[in-house]
Structure formats: structure tokens, C-alpha cells
Image (tube, rainbow, N blue to C red):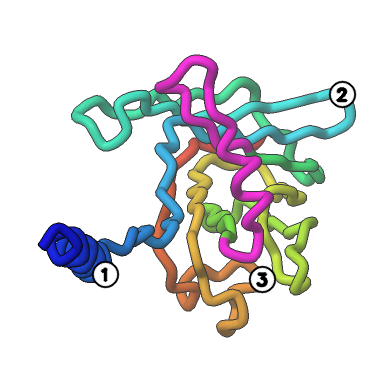
Amino acid sequence: MKNLKNVSLALLGLLVISCNNDEVVVPPVTNEEELITTVKVTLTNGSNSIVLQSKDLDGDGPNAPVVTGVGNLIANTTYVGSIQFLNESVNPADNITEEILAEDEDHQIFYQLSSGLGTITYTDNDSNNKPVGLGFTYQTNAAGTGNLVVTLRHLPSKSAPGVASGNIANAGGSTDAEVTLPITIQ
């Protein structure tokens, strides 16, 4: 009788263990969208640097971004440009530019100038030889004022017509950040 009881308990234990089908399900890793509070464009001509910046510390909150520009651009001049994306809602600030560089095939920055303000040309490419936009040149035209709209797109169609030359119309994808910066050319 004692053996029958032990065998029954052993079988019951095996049955309970074998019926346990609790598999650990690991959720897929998703690429979380980072908060971008600050977009900083630096334009350099020799030793002369102009910094255009949009800072919106509450993100999509009710406060409007603070847009600043230090200095005026010179007419008919070529500037070497760079851009930086930051999350300054945390301390120390997160440099989102590093993530864009690491995932350059998934991002493109578009620069749209008001009519007559000049042309922007990409100077950097991803591993597929498609533009990214972290580096660029800006050739100003004659004196004037207007805006530079900067748009960071995630998963754009970089092979679509015109996208490689900076035309955002066919890019698709989702907008990670978009700012409007005032431009003055003297």
C-alpha cells in the first residue's frame, strides 16, 4: 500500500510538471521614438559660424518652441552645415544625433528653403549611398529673408523620385521632428 501511495504521488507530480506550459514570451524589441526637444543647425563659413536653434522642452505640450538665430548669413556664400538633435528634458541631455547616425539607413533629414534663399546639398550618405542629411552645404543667394524648414523622417522611401536630392514630397515615412527656422541673408 505504501508503494502504491508513493507511485501515485510520483505520477501525480510528473503529470503536474508535464502539464505546465508556461512559456516565457519575450516581446519583440521595438524602436522607441526618442523625444527630440532641440534641433540645432550650425552653418560655418571659414571662422564665421551661425547657429539656428529650435528648443521645445515640453515636446508636444502647450508651450511654443523657442527659436533663436545668432548672426546673419552673407549673400552668395557657401556654408558648411551640420545638425544636432537633442533631448534636453533630461540631465545630462541625450544626443539623439548619435542614434540617427547609427540607424542612418532608416533616417533622412530634409531641408526646405523659402524661394530665392539658395540651395542645400547633402554631403553624407548611408551604406546604400543614399543621403542622410547630418552634413550638408548651403549656397546662399542674394539678400533676403524667409524660412528654413528642417524635417527628420523615419523610414523614408529613399529610392522614391526626388528624395535623394531632398524633395520630401515622395519620401513617405513618419516625421520624428520638424522645425521652422528664420533665415536672414545680407
Three-letter amino acid code of the residue under disc 2: Ser
Is residue 97 magenta-colored?
yes
Residue 14 coordinates in the image, percent (x, y): 25, 66
Q: Residue at x 73, y 64 (%)?
A: 126
Are circles 3 and 1 on residues that touch, CB within 8 Å?
Answer: no
Three-letter amino acid code of the residue under disc 1: Ser
Q: Which residue is mark 1?
A: 18
Sort mark 2 into few (<14), some (14-19) or many (20+) by Cα contacts within 10 Å: few
Residue that lies at the very extreme toward the front in this rendered image: 1
Q: Which residue is mark 3?
A: 165
SS under mark 2: loop
Q: Which residue is mark 2?
A: 47
- Camera-near label (1 vs 2) is 1
- Camera-near label (3 vs 2) is 3
SS under mark 1: helix
Q: Residue at x 55, y 25 (%)?
A: 69
Residue 158 coordinates in the image, percent (x, y): 60, 75
- Horizontally, residue 37 falls left or right of residue 77, namely left
Three-letter amino acid code of the residue under disc 3: Ser
Q: Pick the residue in front: 86 or 14.
A: 14
SS under mark 3: helix
Is residue 30 magenta-colored?
no
Sort mark 3 into few (<14), some (14-19) or many (20+) by Cα contacts within 10 Å: some
Quadrant in which the N terminus is drawn: bottom left
Q: Pick the residue in front: 4 or 135.
A: 4
| Highlighted range, magenta | 84-106
